Amino acid sequence: MEANGVPTHFVDRPSAKEMRVKSVKIIPLEVVVRNIAAGSLCLQTGLKLGTNLQPSLVEFYYKNDHLGDPLLTRDRLRLLDLATDDQVDQLIKMAQWINDLLMGFFQQCGITLVDFKLEFGVDAAQQILLADEISPDTCRLWNQSETDPDRRVMDKDRFRRDLGNVEEAYQQVLKRILDQGV
């Protein structure tokens, strides 16, 4: 992300088991970007699984386990004082920018980026930074060469839907990413 100009909390990796990051105050929101209807969007709206969303949908969920991480509107964000209007605009812009980058990258890997979740933080200079991982645990990924709805799943849905072969799917994602020279 940093190589493409997206500001992140990442500093470096001193070893394979360590990562240094900038200190941030996490904004208590999950920012979800949806390119294709799946998961809770289908359950809550009746959209058919696999419906292309144009433009992509950016949603905000309150990071509050006690409340069940509810979907929030811009007005509710303001009411709860979770983010200013300017911050919401920045979060949407950054999420769309990251989506564009990831869509192109995963396309090269033969993977469809269905949707994903991001978290952001604010540093001491009040700059919003991406402060989250991007992985098959935070993305919904489909194998482009597979048409079977269950077999195409390459992410955490393999676990959620008891499809098995979770590790194999994650390894396939890793292999395709490494094949791109990352």
Image: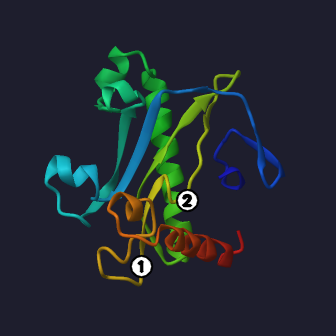
Task: Residue 71: name its quadrant.
Answer: top left
Q: SS of the residue at dot 1?
A: loop
Q: Is residue 65 above or below residue 145?
A: above
In-image side of 45 versus 171 (left or right)? left
Q: Residues within 10 Å of mark 1 (few under 14, many from 20)?
A: some
Q: Which residue has dot 2 on it?
A: 101
Image point (43%, 20%), residue name: 82
**Which residue is at 80% across, 47% downward?**
12
Q: x, y percentage for residue 156?
A: 44, 59
Expressed as whole percent of the image width and height from the top left, the position of residue 15 reads 84, 52
Q: Position of residue 121 (x, y in %)?
A: 59, 30
Write down the residue under mark 1: 144
**105 vs 92: above or below:** below
Q: Is residue 108 left or right of residue 125?
A: left
Kind of residue at disc 1: Gln
**Quadrant of res 62:** top left
Residue farthest right in this picture: 14
Are the residues flagged by discs 1 and 2 in contact, CB closer than 8 Å? no
Residue 80 position (above or below residue 38): above
In which quadrant will I find the C terminus? bottom right
Query: In terms of image quadrants, where is residue 42?
Result: bottom left
Q: Secondary structure at mark 2?
A: helix
Q: Which mark is residue 19?
A: none
Report the residue at 53% width, 52% height from top: 98
The residue carrying pointer 2 sits among few (fewer than 14), some (14 to 19) or many (20 or more) residues within 10 Å by Cα, namely some
- In front: 164, or 31? 164
Tell me which numbered mark, 1 or 2, is placed earlier along the sequence: 2
* Spot occupied by residue 47 in the image (x, y as percentages of width and height): 17, 57
Amino acid identity at mark 2: Leu
* Image-based side of 167 in relation to 81, left or right: right
Q: Nearer the viewer, residue 69 or 74?
A: 69
